[in-house]
């Protein structure tokens, strides 16, 4: 890493690959020979058209999106989609099933309740403080639901699905904000995949959505804001109004980078290696605990604690001197959280483990 930069373990916005940041810098004064930066450019210009189309094509290529899906860029981040999804596709029976496996899936269910006849909780691990992902057998799915909603990776609680829920003919909708492009996924198993881009792809404010074409034919609620009507946005190539031009540009650069790096198979191998280093270390000693069910462990957000609030505080306070930041756990969980997205180098994880060992040795 470049001198002066630190290992930033933030859950989001989070680290971006350094070569991408350098490319942004290099193109800042003159992007694509336009004589202007991407920040100053009309979204209707030829250069920008090339950028957004390349971003869409890259997402399709990198994620292996089948032909009967569309890639959209929408305003409002992931939380915007908590409202936009029920408004657009919750219009058959007006009933949807939500699996609540953490904070964001709970927030999605609460938002959906405003618009649907019923946003059912079809499964939850809340009674165990979200330390595991509900199993297929624990799900109480309704045959008449318009869709089933899950949160793929629980950013705050540090868990992730290890199976794809079987939902029959009911489309599966997944919030993949904190795991998007960290490993390959079988897109064909989902009706919608959406993500706030600020964890693994770009700066904040934008939602990436991958939607099966038949779902665009469902009639949206009359109250749906025009800018969140999925069908209209698909027809307008996500440019009904001015899109979030800069985040979309960064999605293009990050996906260019992912292609160069060997795509999602390569990212998965790297991410598995980083996560294994950290979890193996957590498992091999008694000083730190990872309170999460082993088979449901997140590869992106690693939650751990010492067992003493005082020691946790001291651990977090010591991070700056080591060249780390954002290791404090979310207030709902306490302890520590290391978010190790695609852009976190293995060296950052190794340096963290060294610090954990040193801290444990001096506080046993
Ligand atoms: C960060 C996050 C969100 C919230 O994203 P916003 O873009 O801030 O609305 C939602 N879901 C998950 C899984 C997240 O990690």
Image (cartoon, grey):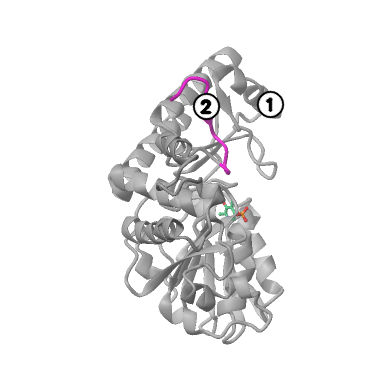
Q: Quadrant of the C terminus?
A: top right
Q: Main secondary structure of the magenta part?
A: loop
- Report which quarter residue 142 is drawn in: bottom right
- The verdict on residue 6 being magenta is yes
Residue range of the region highlighted in magenta in the rendering: 1-13
Q: Give the image quadrant in which the ligand numbered 1 is located.
A: bottom right
Q: Which mark is residue 33?
A: none
Tag 1's secondary structure? helix
Looking at the rendered structure, which numbered label has been put on residue 286? Answer: 2
How far across and how far down the image is residue 340, in percent?
48, 38
Viewer-closest of 129 and 15: 15
Mark 2 → mark 1, Cα distance in angstroms: 18 Å
In the current view of this chain or complex, which residue is farthest to the front? 35
Going by the picture, which residue comes out furthest to the top? 362
Q: Where's residue 283, x and y in %?
A: 45, 32
Quarter placement of the N terminus: top left
- Which residue lies at the image location 49% right of the left edge and 57% below the top edge? 176
Q: Which residue is mark 1?
A: 313
**Tag 2's secondary structure?**
loop
Give the mark, 2 or 1, whose residue is nearer the N terminus.
Answer: 2
């Amino acid at each position: 890493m470049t001198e002066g930069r630190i290992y930033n373990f933030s859950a989001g916005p989070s680290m971006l690959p350094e070569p991408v940041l350098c490319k942004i810098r290099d193109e800042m004064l003159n992007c694509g020979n336009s004589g202007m930066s991407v920040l100053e450019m009309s979204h209707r210009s030829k250069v920008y058209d090339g950028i957004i189309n390349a971003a869409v094509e890259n997402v399709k290529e990198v994620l292996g999106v089948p032909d009967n899906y569309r890639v959209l860029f929408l305003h409002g981040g992931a939380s915007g989609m908590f409202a936009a999804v029920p408004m657009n596709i919750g219009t058959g029976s007006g009933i949807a099933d939500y699996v609540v496996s953490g904070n964001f899936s709970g927030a999605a269910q609460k938002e959906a309740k405003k618009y649907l006849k019923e946003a059912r909780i079809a499964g939850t691990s809340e009674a165990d403080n979200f330390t595991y992902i509900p199993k297929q057998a624990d799900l109480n799915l309704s045959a008449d639901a318009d869709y089933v909603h899950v949160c793929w990776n629980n950013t705050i609680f540090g868990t992730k699905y290890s199976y794809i829920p079987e939902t029959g003919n009911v489309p599966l909708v997944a919030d993949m904000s904190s795991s998007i492009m960290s490993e390959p996924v079988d897109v064909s198993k989902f009706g919608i995949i959406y993500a706030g881009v600020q964890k693994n792809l770009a700066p904040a404010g934008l939602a990436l959505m991958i939607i099966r074409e038949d779902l665009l034919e469902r009639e949206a609620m009359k109250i749906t804001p025009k800018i969140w009507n999925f069908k209209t946005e698909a027809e307008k190539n996500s440019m009904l109004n001015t899109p979030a031009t800069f985040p979309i540009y960064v999605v293009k650069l990050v996906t260019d980078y992912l292609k160069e790096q060997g795509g999602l198979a390569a990212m998965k191998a790297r991410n598995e290696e980083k996560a294994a280093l950290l979890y193996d270390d957590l498992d091999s000693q008694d000083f730190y605990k990872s309170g999460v069910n082993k088979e449901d462990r997140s590869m992106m957000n690693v939650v751990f604690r010492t067992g003493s609030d005082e020691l946790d505080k001291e651990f977090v306070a010591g991070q700056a001197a080591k060249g780390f930041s954002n290791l404090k756990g979310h207030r709902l969980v306490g302890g520590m959280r290391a978010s190790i997205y695609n852009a976190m180098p293995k060296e950052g994880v190794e340096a963290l483990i060294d610090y954990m060992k040193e801290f444990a040795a001096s506080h046993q």
